[in-house]
Image (cartoon, helix red, strand yellow):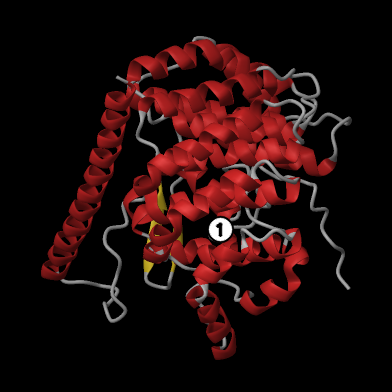
Amino acid sequence: MGKKRNTNKVTLAVPLSVAAIGGGKGGGSIGGPDPSDTSDLESVYSASVVGEGADSDNENDFASLVDSFGDLVENAQDKRIETRLRAIDSLLLVLNKNCIPESVEKWRGTLAEIILVNLKRTSEEATRVCSLAALLSLQLGVGIEEDICEIVNLMRQICSDVSASEVVRSSCAQAIGLCVYLSVESHNDRLESMQTLKSIWSAMKPAGVGGTSLFSSALASWSLLLERFDSVFISTQIGEMQPRICSFLESTTVEARISAGEALMILHEIGVENIDDEFQFSNQNYLKQILGNLAADSSKNRAKRDKKLQKLTFRHINDVICNEKLEQLSIRFNKRETLDIQKCHQKLLYDLLCQLLKSDLNGHLTKNLVLRELFDLGPVLSIEEPVKMSKSQKIERLVQFGEQKKQMNINRSKGRAKKNDHKHALIEYED
């Protein structure tokens, strides 16, 4: 019998330069329950990669779970914790392995209530519904903004609560990043999330960094969301927080050093894109020296694995910040398409999605309109569509994508109008 993984361990910082491409390996805190804890469920759905094919029995069993989505939602509200956990695990499996926005839209209010209630319960339930919240955002995008804002507000409170467990706080911090990035357009909600995340990671002490997983997840989410703001805000944040991030390069834990280095790499890229084409940090010379030292570190006090990981990662970080050299990554999926990652920020988003979806990311890249729009993949390919298309076929695909995007914008406008009408009604009632 294989050794059971420690379910209390939270691995959040997947190095951007060394994460396995396409494999989705990485035990992120919002990656759902550990497979060893749900053997009776996971054994049915253990196909290695979406698109590779599973046997007919497994497909039929999974189809039955999709068909009983409403029953799973009802069971997730059961009074017995065992029933609730089994139902939530099944919901996570369904939403991981399939893109079913219609079913999610039908039950979104109830699903949001399930998340809000279980965030206040045990650590097991709270970490699971953090995954569920991220998956709802992935399924519906900005179409679920109103519900997600309420969920994120509670997650911010939990993140800031020092009495809560580190595992739950880390899960909330990482879920905030994905939920806000995918579903929230409100400037105020984005800003409040940024401030909460910043207050968490910046308050930690570089020497030691006791809660490494919390530090890594909060810093990664903060870096992810920074790109959503205007150039003035970005410039202010980089000027204020970059020296603080640099201080964590001297942390005693390799995970904290790598998380800080990768955040600096993303900040540099955002600075070049939004502030100045020749953007440099105010302490560029100092940073160049310390990055060079970390890339060549041969200290006997460090473990062999840590030294190897640090050298590989910081060579890449040094190339990006000091030499403006970034290798393009090409990720093949569904045997017909390729995702080209040309930016550090794209790689961060990809890695966070890998931690959430693991091998099921390929299926979402193939079918999920929210992800395809984010990664510029165009409209969903039809089953019979050839790999190489003629010019007319490419134009037709672009027209289809334009129509799909237009419909998404119409749905967003309806959601905003409904939200504004609700606010006006409340104001009139108060008057």
Q: Residue at x 52, y 75 (%)?
A: 68
Q: Percent position (x, y) of residue 190?
A: 43, 28
Image label count: 1
> Can you see residue 311?
no
* Position of residue 145 measured from the top left corner of the image (x, y, whole percent): 39, 42
State which quarter of the image contains the C terminus.
top left
Q: Is residue 329 left or right of residue 411?
A: right
Q: Residue furthest left?
A: 392
Judged left or right of residue 216, residue 418 is: left
Which residue shows up at 67% across the image and 46% down it?
126
| 158 shown above or below 61 | above
Measured along the vertical axis of the image, is residue 253 above or below residue 181? above
- Check disc 1 and report the residue beneath it: 357
Secondary structure under badge 1? helix
User: Which sits in the foreground, 109 or 160?
Assistant: 109
In the image: residue 314, left or right of residue 398: right
| Viewer-side residue, 362 vs 339 | 362
Question: What's under tag 1, amino acid-wise?
Answer: Leu
Which residue is depicted at the point 22% across and 53% down? Answer: 405
Residue 87 visible somewhere in the drawing: yes
Give the quarter of the figure containing the N terminus: bottom right
Residue displayed at 70% across by 40% down: 168
Determine the residue located farthest toward the bottom in the rendered image: 56
Frontmost residue, 21 versus 193: 193
Query: Counting other residues with Cα less than 10 Å from the Cα at mark 1, is it few (<14), some (14-19), or many (20 or more)?
Result: many
Q: Position of residue 315 (x, y in %)?
A: 61, 35
Rendered location of residue 115, percent (x, y): 57, 48
In terms of depth relative to the viewer, which is nearer, 357 or 294? 357
